[in-house]
Image (cartoon, helix red, strand yellow):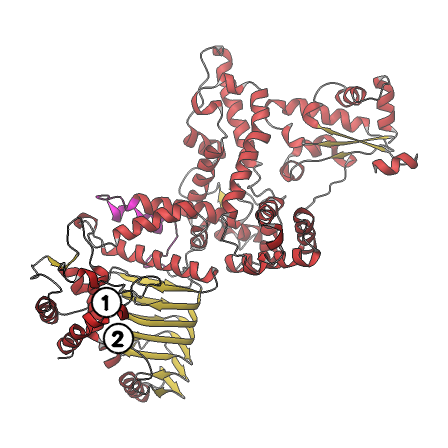
Amino acid sequence: MAKQSEFEPSVGIPAYAELPLLLHTDALETWLSAQGIHLPLADIRVLIEEGIIVPVLDALDELVRGQAREGSRMFLNRLGQSFGPRARGVLSSRDYYLNLDPLVRDELGDRASYLTVGYFNRQGRRRYIQVRTGLSSDHAARWAHQLETQAKEALVGAGDEEIASLVGHPLFLDAFCQMIEAIPDAKRANEAATFQLRSPNIFGEILERVLTREHTEKFLPSWRGNGYESQLADRWKDPFTPALQQLILRRIVLMVAQRGGTDALKHSAEDQRYARLRHGLFSFSETEEPLTLQQIIIEELGEPEAEPHVPESEREAVCAHAVDVVVEAIRSHTLADTQPDQPKGLVFATRHRAYFDYFLAQAVLDELISSLVPNHQLDENFVLWCIEHNIVEHSEQKEAPPFASCLDFVLWHREELADAVEETARYLGPEPAEADFSEELASYICSLALALLLRYGQQRGGTQLVGFDAASDRQCTISVNADIVPTIKNLRIDSCLFPDLTVDNVDIVDVDVVDSELRSLRLDGALKWERVSLSAQIDELVLGGRAELENCILDVHGAGADNPQLDLGRDTKVTMRGCSLSPVLYERLHDLSRDHGTWLQLSDCKPIEVGTVERYSPGRKFVNRFVNLSKKHGHPEYGVFREKLKGRSLATSMSLAAALEVLARNRVIESANATMVKMTKDAEPYRYSGKAAPGQRSYDEVAEFWDPIVTELDDVFRR
């Protein structure tokens, strides 16, 4: 427009200005005069009215909050009067003010046309990436495609519009392009093929940048300009730092999680706008007084207090206005949902479900870490906290928990996740404090730990789960359901120990389970397994729900194979097609299908030929467990707690005693006492990785020492 105005007299001359500079009488005319239009203010006003000068005024959002609001009203009113039939101008703002604030429409009314600029669409995202990074259009399209595909995988169940509103947000694309720009030019084009959305901490970077910008660029200038920094004490000198913003936003998210989205769900039948705000906080509640942002902010930051130099007569007004400013800042936050025509009762909702999940995931990790502190009352912390915040379902709850999707975003919190993994390992370690023992807590933590590992594997396109030890000497149950892990693909599970494992409504594809042990395995719900190879010792096997197993290999041994159970329920229908089964399991399932054909059907299944599936012998498995569990525990010798070795090896008291005699006779251990089994100095050089972990000494390297011992142990466990 500026270029056209040089050659076309009929095209107005655009004049750009930031509104905070203009808020006073004749502000626009005075500003234009100072910029070089050396005419009387009245003449400049005529140029505006005739459309010769076209004002482009930005940052209205910085004017209509707090004490500047009344001045803004007068400014808008005068601006509206200045715009005659031929006048033109542009007034820009973040969406909250133009969509929701009545001040703008009250003063400009029908004299203004309203245009909303939304998120970048598919074509816009590709063009944005191309311009920002210098990539060709083809390479920019590859990056955009990877971003869109992986975002859809990360946000399970989200629609195309919901995905687009996240990855099309300028802040998201800005952080994404910064990550691309950090790649050397020579590699930048081809790195798209290996890009993983969760590899960088892209969400953390976005939030940090958003909160910092809200504080330094949007909030502080107005706050200081109104003198609050010098008038108020303690936190209220600067109540909108990134850390305090997070405090307020997390409090709101936790309140929503506690309510489970029931307010929105209850009203969605009458108004579908409530359905999209399941993660929103509403003021209507049957059990408590209506909530307001003022209450939440004061509860988190404390009541504002004026400094001693502020006159007594002004203190109350100063404090009240300060709270109003912070309330407006939260309501108009970049992360806030500011769509027009919001449903009744909405206090606050995040702009996108992903931000809600991210804050909730951060809270999950913090709660887990604090709950694992020694001598803490664990049952009253993590377990109840997860139930109260609807992260996992109640034992008696029939509906799926609405906020389990936040577990995806636990993986985005790099530092917190590392701390949580370390504390979880300590809790599940060889020396758990007796005061910390809790069957229920162990069940929750093991389920969460496995869910994180499985989800982490999914987003990496497949992974190995090696040596996962889920406290098999404890009476706990691991539940893997569709809310926690929707699908499991491309996974290898090697040398893992599980207690009671329930798989509910989870599809499993291309998974290989090797040399693992389960106290029990229960299939439930509607699930489908394809190309699953399961080589494991299972003490109890229960088949139920509407399970379909196709082209699977079940090399199952132990009591579960000898006596598989069929859960005969109204919805039970287990179907196996083209599966290869261990001989004993094949025989038992055929008997069950003959007696209960309505519930169990086998089609084109066959027994596995002996020797076609490699499996460790019982003696080798016992040695693997022994060397893997042996730690120094602060003592000079390597050792393992006797009861832990018994539980993890699934040995009986009699077989354990006989096995320890073999180890003692071969100078592997000292005489075992009632508590500890200690390794001798002679045997220490022959320790190896019992988990088959890559990069560590393998059994084959020390087989000459162990083979004769394994042979003796095989006789013990086969008696």
- Disc 1 and disc 2: Cα gap in Å? 10 Å
Location of residue 525 with respect to 54 vertically, above or below: below
Please tell me how crowded label 1 is: few (under 14), some (14-19), or many (20+) other residues with Cα within 10 Å: many
Quarter of the image for residue 521 reads bottom left
Is residue 300 shown left or right of residue 270?
Answer: left
Circle 2 SS class: loop
* Kind of residue at disc 1: Asn
Residue in view at x 32 percent, y 49 percent: 422
Residue in view at x 13 percent, y 65 percent: 668
Q: Give the range drawn in magenta.
A: 371-397
Location of residue 677 with respect to 279 vertically, above or below: below
Query: Does any portion of residue 345 appear in the rendered image?
Result: no
Q: Mark 1 points at which residue?
A: 624
Q: Residue 326 carries which label?
A: none
Is residue 317 shown left or right of residue 633?
Answer: right
CB under 8 Å between discs 1 and 2: yes
Q: Where is residue 533 in the image (x, y as percent from the top left)?
A: 37, 76
Foreground pick, 615 / 458: 615
Q: Position of residue 495 (x, y in %)?
A: 30, 67
